[in-house]
Amino acid sequence: MSIWASEQDTSAALREAPSGTSAAKEMTGRLVLVSNRVPALVGEAQAGGLAVAVEELLRQQGGLWLGWSGVISARGSKEKEAVRRQVRGAVEYVTLDFSRKDYSGYYNGFANGVLWPLLHTLPELVTFDQRDAATYYHVNARLADALLPLLRPGDVIWVHDYHLLPLPRLLRARGARAPIGFFLHTPFPKADVIELVPAVGPLVRDVLAADLIGFQTTQDLQNFAAAAERFAGAKISSSEPVLEFGRRRVRLGVFPVEINVDAFAAAAAQSAAGPAAQRLSASLGAQSLILGIDRLDPTKGLLQRLAGLRRLFERYPEWRRRATLLQIAALSRQDVASYRALKAALDCAAGSLNAEFGEPDWLPLRLLSRAGQRETIAGFMRLARVGLVTPLRDGMNLVAKEYVAAQDPRDPGVLVLSRFAGAAKQLDAALLVNPHDPEEIAEALHRALGMEQEERRARWQALYQSLAGSSSLTWGQAFLSALTRARTEAASSARTGLMHKASAAERRQARLGYWADQQAALQH
């Protein structure tokens, strides 16, 4: 596969991923997952995209999952009791508590105050503090220390997402020799954006300690390759998706996250006949439902979405009393200032919209800030005439894929999708919009609400075909298969002298990294 291969080519490759049996043969040891949190133990009402994508794979493969417990401990991170181990079936869950200081600096401060907005090309929302950067590194080092004694020969390590960018290098510095894969669920921006925050460029070098680095789209891969060249001095292969870094070869790949289409479709059909969906349907009467499902997050384009809805009712008054938007915007990261500000702005915009256009027996917008059960939301999706998914930028956006899977094939709804979501490359039969343009959103909503059944069915069939045959399981298997091949290539390179054993000085540099000069900041 060329480094410039299209997402369509990669999606086809995913549908040809090895079966669970053959994938297991490629792996001689356990699958070891490392992520920010371990959702199976946190007990969230609605599982995030990462949890949905990897839990089935881990249950089938068996192994270990390491991450934060979700607990902020008053004892601090030095207590041995803060590490918990639980076994459920074939999976061992190992969780660590965080101190209030670690949670504030690592999670709220650097991961979500710097990396999240920067990776989504929203630098105006970045709030950078060197002490947060040092704490981010400290927490990653603690995770590396916790994982190392748990590793067994033959294990394969799969690190997930922007919270853990330094972890591959930290593991190597501690002597981990297992294959390491890293997957970034978010977008990856242009190198010029990365350069805006001095602490982020060195993280590109850190993640290059992995054998395989995976992305949602080709654009993300290309952006990362350019950043690796600029900030780490890596050389880009002209013939294959490989970076030459020092004496190592690091393979890159595009692996768009998938959903279990058939299972979600069945759940939607069942839930649509359930009490929650039937109550919603009765409350709508003859109105068409427009549905938005998001976390309350600046990247989701919620304020711009409401501006588009306002323009719909201004430009096309015939839809007043005939359509309403149910927007579920589950509260998220309320410890972060930009999220609190968004909540206040969204409440204000929603109140203004309803006050201006609402009637005693009709409101243009129903806004909820509580997350719903996944099965209930699936039923709502099946009822919705329009699925409105307009993030300003998104790594993939599984909600868009779930909306497609949830539809009744005989009378499907219409997906209105941001062209800046990773899913837009795959779901190009949707009505694609610029989420920054209220006029374009309004026009797409007008078109979707009035679309004839024949066109709706043709568009839905094209969308469904783009998802059919793939699943979260085949996605994970494809990544692990590629990781096995990458590791084999790396071993071959080592035999020919392209790799070398790290010297003591190199191991120390890898252990300390960029934040060696920032450790003193933790004392202030």
Image (tube, grey):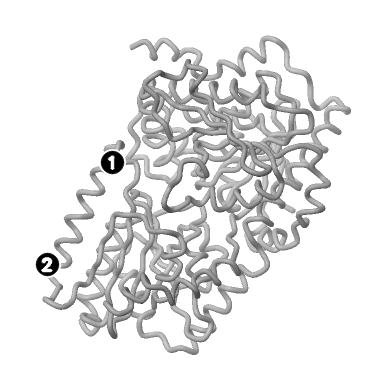
**Residue drawn at the location 32% of the way across and 56% of the way down:** 329
> Which quarter of the figure has residue 154?
top right
Categorize mark 2 by other alpha carbons within 10 Å: few (<14), some (14-19), many (20+). Answer: few
Categorize mark 1 by other alpha carbons within 10 Å: few (<14), some (14-19), many (20+). Answer: some
Placement of the C terminus among the 4 image quadrants: top left
Pick whichever, 385 or 83, lies toward us.
Answer: 83
Q: Is residue 27 above or below residue 461?
A: above
Say left or right for 170 vs 379: right
Q: Is residue 96 above or below residue 260?
A: above
Q: Position of residue 399 (x, y in %)?
A: 47, 61
Q: Position of residue 184 (x, y in %)?
A: 56, 43
> Which quarter of the figure has residue 322?
bottom left
Amino acid carrying label 2: it is: Ala
Residue at mark 1: 338
Pick whichever, 71 or 314, lies toward us.
Answer: 71
Q: Residue 355 bears which disc, if any?
A: 2
Say left or right for 299 vs 81: left
Amino acid carrying label 1: it is: Ser
Say left or right for 130 vs 37: left
What distance separates the C-alpha of mark 1 from that of mark 2?
A: 26 Å
Count of residue discs: 2
Q: Is residue 331 above or below residue 81?
A: below
Q: Position of residue 29 (x, y in %)?
A: 77, 37
> Which quarter of the figure has residue 511?
top right
**Residue drawn at the location 47% of the way across and 15% of the way down:** 78
Mark 1 and mark 2 lie on one chain; the one further toward the N terminus is 1
Pick whichever, 417 or 156, lies toward us.
Answer: 156
Q: Secondary structure at mark 2?
A: helix
**Residue drawn at the location 34% of the way across and 75% of the way down:** 445
Q: Secondary structure at mark 1?
A: helix
